[in-house]
Amino acid sequence: MVFSKQLMKESMLPSVLEVNDTEPESESDSEWDNLRGIGSRPTSRPQKAFSRGSTDNKTVSRAGKGQSPALSRALSSEVSREENVPSEQDDDDNALENKPADSSEKETVSAEEEWDTDLELEDMKEPYDPTGHSCYKAACKVFGVVPVSYFLRHMNDTELIMMHHGLGPQSAKALAVPLVTNTSILKLNLRDNWIEGLGGAAIAEMLKENCYITEIDLSENKLGERGAQALSSMLLENTTLVTISLSGNDFDDHAAKHLAEALVSNQKVESMVLSHNMMGDGAGEALGNAIAENTGLKTLNLSWNCLRGKSSIAVAKGLGANIFLRKLDLSYNGFGKDGAAALGEALKVNNVLEDLNISNNQIPPEGAVRFAMGLKENKTLKILSMSRNPMQSAGCYGILKSMEGNPESAIETLDFSDIIVNKDFDELYNKVKEMFPNLQVKHERNADSFSFKTSKVPKDPLGKLKYHIKKNNLKLEDSFDSVEEGGSALITRAEFQLGLKGIGTCLTMEEVQQLMDDLDKDNCGEIDFREFSTLLKKA
């Protein structure tokens, strides 16, 4: 009947409605192939008033998982069209429902039920995979690589360590696909996988989308300039990364310029490692400007590069302008005399740096002395490493002399490893040690043991006690709590013995008794602590 044909026509998908009305109702198989996966081929049938799960007389569309966006839009438009049917048409539909259904209508309803059932079965065949396993395996097929079983087992850990897996560029690209939407991994370590520039670019693109990874290690992957350019582009967009390690990636002066551009704009990365690369004379100016402009980095490692001459001076000037960097490693470069002098000038104005490593930088004695001139005005540096420099004992002496002239110096550790010092240095160290009791100095022979190895242990109780206190870096006042500041300095013999016990002295009972007799000459039972301290210094 005419009305039945009109209703059937309105119930078809938009793609089907485009077919000419004059064509036969049975279409060719090739035309229906476009809807494969939806269900069995639809037949001409009236639309059901209700679908399963509905609560009113409106048709509810069920967009199953895996359903295409086009299909979802089509079903949505169909529901909208049915909701807007005029009231007269609804009256006609109610009138038709009271009529007995003929055999053709029954067959149509049966076909529709089969169509709904097939749709549900199709959804069950392709369930959503929240783990990302299916996505990774599909990517491996596309890039022609074997899935890494370790990654499949640990891709939902908070820290993924995949060092030395020999991934290569193609496997890195496949790995990047599921990582785009991964929300579990916070720390990613891909060290030593030779992913090269192509794989590095894929990881960089992934990091543009992933907003969960905060630490990544891409060291020893031969990324080269192409990888550096891709990572630079990523750092301009990424706001999540806090730590990035790019050691041993063949970065030259051109790569350094790309990374320097990113450091100027990126203020989120707090720690960056660029050691064991090939950045030299052409990289100094770019890196110096980046250090001066950056306001996010707290730790920067530029060790084992080729920074020397003008390049080293530019980096030093950048340090002087920086007000956020806390730790800087410049070891194993070639700063030399001029670079060391420039670093000294930077330390005059820099008031935030706490840890500086300039070991093995070909710094001669003159360079160390000029560096010490800046150190004389610095008040924040706590750790200074200058080991394996040809600055000899004279250079080490100059550093200690600058500390002696700077009562506000914050230095706690000086590393002069593999540098032999002489007796002048040892004597100055003993003076500086009194000013800074917490100071620790390292060199080829420990400064404390330097003088004691050349002398015998005293035999008298007072000298023996002084040797013990100095050797173990002890404070005599800490063990005699009963001594009041600014008040009486008299202590009883019992308090004296208890104080000696607190510093762990190796004196025998006879030596302790002899020492107390010498200090309590009038035999009144009390000892003057100030007198005891004075005699101890002279011993």
Image (tube, rainbow, N blue to C red):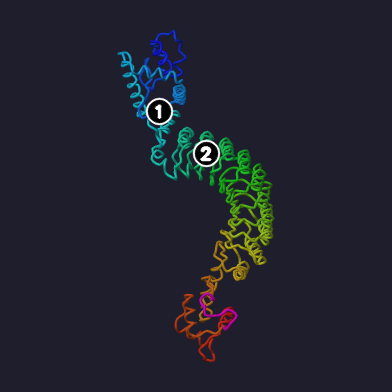
Residue that carries the numbered disc 1 in the rendered image:
62
- In what quadrant of the picture does the N terminus appear? top left
Residue type of the residue flagged with mark 1: Arg
- Tell me if residue 483 is in the magenta stretch: yes
Q: In the shown orientation, is residue 508 left or right of residue 240?
A: left
Q: Helix or strand or loop: what does disc 1 sit on? A: loop
Amino acid under label 2? Leu
Main SS category, magenta section: loop
User: Depth check: 214 or 278 in front?
Assistant: 214
Is residue 187 inside the magenta stretch?
Answer: no
Q: Quadrant of residue 248?
A: top right
Q: Is residue 286 visible?
A: yes
What residue is drawn where x is 64% and y is 65%?
A: 408
Residue found at the very far left of the displayed protein: 103
Q: Which residues are magenta?
A: 476-488
The percent position of residue 493, horizontal first and vertical second, equals 49, 85
Mark 2, residue position: 207
Residue 409: x, y in percent?
63, 64
